[in-house]
Image: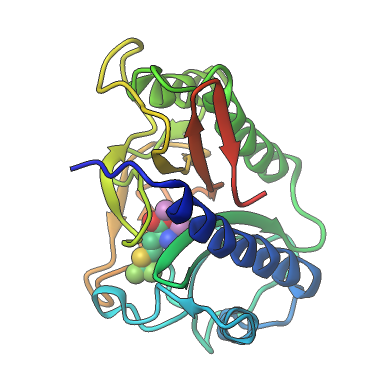
Amino acid sequence: MIRIKSPEEIEKIRAACRIVRDTLGFVGSKIKAGMTTKEVDALVYKYITSCGAYPSSLGYEGFPASACISVNDVVVHGIPSDDVILVDGDIVSVDVTAEKDGYNGDAARTFTIGNVSEEKKRLVKVTEECFFKALEGLRAGTPLYDIGYAVQTHAEANGYGVVRALTGHGIGRDMHEDPSVPNFGKKGTGIRLKAGMTICIEPMINLGTWKVWQDAADGWTVRTMDGLPSAHYENTVLVTRDGAEILTL
Ligand code: MF3
Ligand code: CO
Ligand code: CO
């Protein structure tokens, strides 16, 4: 069931999204080579709780941290660890969800650490572009899979693989609500978006194959099958009558 949000609910989602945006800005200003991903997670916890919000990922289906921190070939759901030390040349996706007054906001950025190869820089840039391609023309009435079509077309035109196993999603009272928002699909198909829907659009784009595997040892970490790097870019978006508003930017 897709929930249409009331103006009052939208204000609460907006507030949660501002906290997520500011948390990622804060993390971006601090993250550097030599830090562990656990230290980055601690920054996220501290910032979100200082805003009177809760890091929704913490305890979500047993997830043990406040952010998903995914380095290089880790696509998403990386568990912050004392053993993962960021080094020059890494790309690191930090995915943050905050709950404030019962409503959630969710966004992710892929940060570059020090001197990153041109190949990785381009992957990060194109992944962001995929999000903005999906947003072009998005408004009430847009077929849902036009989003995935736009992401897939841009990623594949650049020779990249589009992750299929994970998708974007609706968001509100719950971090994950209907509908599922895939990063691939056929133009003109799927339900029509309506004003008042809040969705997370989150391209997960691989330098090589689209195929991924999930680490059975921790039950979370998703990696590329070929070990090549992956990037992630996510925002929470409000669909309106004549457009779409990015709430986490
Ligand atoms: N924020 C992630 C998303 O974009 C979900 C994280 S769930 C967790 O959907 F449990 F892994 F944290
Ligand atoms: Co997220
Ligand atoms: Co999400």
Pick the front one: 163 or 115: 163
Residue 224 lies left or right of residue 233; in this view the side is left
Residue 71 visible, this orientation:
no
Asked if 237 appears above or below 100 in the picture, the reply is: above
Asked if 42 appears above or below 186 in the picture, the reply is: below
Residue at x-position 31% and y-position 21%: 192
The N terminus lies in quadrant: top left
Direction left: furthest residue: 1
Where residue 236 sits in the image (x, y, percent)?
A: 51, 48
Where residue 135 sits in the image (x, y, percent)?
A: 55, 27
Residue at x-position 22% and y-position 70%: 216
Residue 15 visible, this orientation:
yes
Q: Can you tell which quarter of the image residue 137 is in?
A: top right
Where residue 246 sits in the image (x, y, percent)?
A: 60, 41
Picture colour scheme: rainbow
Q: Can you tell which quarter of the image residue 181 is in?
A: top left
Residue at x-position 59% and y-position 48%: 247
Where residue 195 sits in the image (x, y, percent)?
A: 42, 30
Residue 228 lies left or right of residue 180; in this view the side is right
Pick the front one: 70 or 141: 141
Residue 41 lies left or right of residue 170; in this view the side is right
Asked if 8 appears above or below 77 in the picture, the reply is: above
Residue at x-position 62% and y-position 67%: 19
